[in-house]
Amino acid sequence: MRVLYVDDEDDIREVAALSLGLDPDLEVHVCASGIEALEMVEQVMPEIILLDVMMPGMDGPETLERLRQNEAVRHIPVVFITARTQAYEIERFLSLGAVGVIAKPFDPLTLAQQVREHLETSTAPALSQARAV
């Protein structure tokens, strides 16, 4: 399962890559900006994207909007990673099209499990529809 982790902070990216890498079923790719993510996403074709909200240049919400404009990758679920976890902020992120929010600082020991849960939740309706057809 391929994961694309996008964060402008080097140390957080490194911790995320290490913690996700503990799960042998996860293939982790990282990038440092929204622009880099847009350039890399079609090469990697991840099953899920973890996207920092606050980044210079192109922030997470703008990156998500640009991903949704690309027919080839618009179906990929996106989870925001952010310290902004007030209820109204989470609601806003979900209304933008994210399938979930993981709070920063995240727990490195449970990050992979959280990613799996978001991926299972986001693909469950599609799997049910596929079975119904």
Image: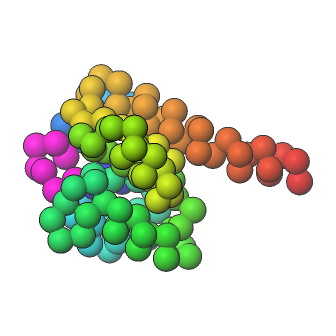
Quadrant hosting residue 31: bottom left
Residue 43 appears in the figure: no
Residue in view at x 38 percent, y 32 percent: 112
Q: Is residue 121 above or below residue 28?
A: above
How far across and down, in percent of the image, does residue 67 sit? 44, 69
What is the quadrant of the C terminus in the image? bottom right
Quick one: 29 or 6, which is closer to the camera? 6
Q: Is residue 53 above or below residue 106?
A: below
Q: Residue 12, relative to residue 8: is it above or below? A: above
The answer to whether residue 8 is magenta is yes
- Asked if one can make out residue 82 in the rendered structure from this viewpoint, the answer is yes
| Residue 15 as seen in the image, left or right of residue 124 | left
Q: Position of residue 6 (x, y in %)?
A: 28, 55
In the rendered image, the residue lying farthest to the right is: 133
Q: Residue at x 32, y 74 (%)?
A: 39
For image coordinates 19% across by 46% down, the residue present is 13
Q: Which residues are magenta?
A: 7-14
Q: Position of residue 9 (x, y in %)?
A: 13, 51
